[in-house]
Amino acid sequence: MERKVGTVSRGVRCPIIREGDNLSTIVVNSVLDAAESEGFTLREKDVIALTESIVARAQGNYANVSAIATDVKNKLGGETIGVIFPILSRNRFAICLKGIAMGAKKVVLMLSYPSDEVGNELVSLDQLDEAGVNPYSDVLTLERYRELFGENKHPFTGVDYVDYYSSIIKNAGADVEIIFSNQPKTILEYTKNVLTCDIHTRVRTKRILTNAGAQNVIGLDDILNSPIDGSGYNEKFGLLGSNKSTEDQIKLFPRECFDLVQDIQKQIKEKTNRHVEVMVYGDGAFKDPVGKIWELADPCVSPAYTEGLEGTPNEVKLKYLADNDFKNLSGDALKDAISERIKHKEDNLVGNMASQGTTPRRLTDLIGSLCDLTSGSGDKGTPVVLIQGYFDNYTN
């Protein structure tokens, strides 16, 4: 019988993960228990994905804000430092800012505007237009910002991040000065010791500042990229991808976890004789059209995945075939013609008109985004996601 269902994404419930847990065994058993409970079976090329949060938790990859302070002070001197281009987030950056401020006497906080890197707005483009402000060139002091725009609370969180970040720095014992600019070199008028906090543009920002004469330039990826007094760390990403754990502690992005995904793949093969793909996922990569927030605050969607998830989709557009190549066919004749075209499609469809309009993104980014939407970030209790049928097509 012809299968009538394509891709299915299931959230899988697991025990609460603690430091030192055997995560691969827990994930495998949870998926198999879910299959038995819900009456489905694993298939070839299913995808098992686990959120980065439980990986980091099992690794015990935590650090106190005091470790951040020590590392910042050691690397930037502990006097006046520039902290530029942070995202506006209570969960992601606020606790990092606390540790950063503890490692300096004064923080010159430079915020990008009208929004941060991932789309959180300080002000709207309409407000800038009305005020006659050019965000590409104009530098605003805090006083000028307030004069023009007053208090601006985030539409979802209700937080005025300018005031919130200022209070965090003061409460950490440092002086604070806030400016608004989108030009990295602006900060060098205030200090030559700079911590750039952007995520996906950090390499360019570091280069610009170094070429412009900065004395010390580091990014969030350079903080806690090695342990401080036994703290957690991430050698590749440092503080990037970290989350608030407690009022004084962060959970960092997981360290090396390729062995983990391979072990889960191996165990599933041994127990079910099915070859599955496995990945660790963080934030998905998609944009909210209302809040304008681009979700990806992690440095990447997937820090580790098995070999079969490498690459991009190689798909033809069904509606293109139906409207062009086979526009004179219908019914079974149309179905058969399209099926034959899919079965004999080229291994690489880049540049082929029949693939125009298919999503030109990496498999891990697409699947990770699906997983992030499936598991959510709240109390669903499904940190593992099983995706079936993702690699199917119309002929299966």
Image (cartoon, rainbow, N blue to C red):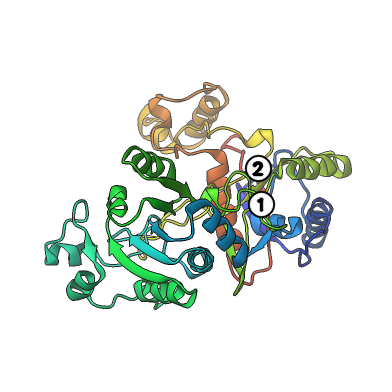
Q: How many marks?
A: 2
Circle 1 SS class: loop
**Outermost residue, right side:** 271
Circle 2 SS class: strand
Give the residue pinned by disc 1: 254
Task: Report the amino acid beneath label 2.
Answer: Ala
Which residue: 58% across, 37% down?
A: 393
**The quarter of the displayed image where residue 215 is located:** top left
Which residue: 52% across, 23% down?
A: 345
- In the image, 61: left or right of 301? right
Q: Quadrant of the N terminus?
A: top right
Residue 166 percent coordinates (x, y): 39, 73
Residue 67 percent coordinates (x, y): 62, 61
Give the residue pinned by disc 2: 304
Mark 2 residue crowding within 10 angstroms, few (<14) / some (14–19) / many (20+)? many
- In the image, 19: left or right of 339? right
Task: Report the amino acid beneath label 1.
Answer: Pro
Which residue: 84% across, 43% down?
A: 267
**The quarter of the displayed image where residue 323 is located:** top left
Instruction: Classify 218 as above or below 290.
Output: above
Which residue: 56% across, 63% down?
A: 69
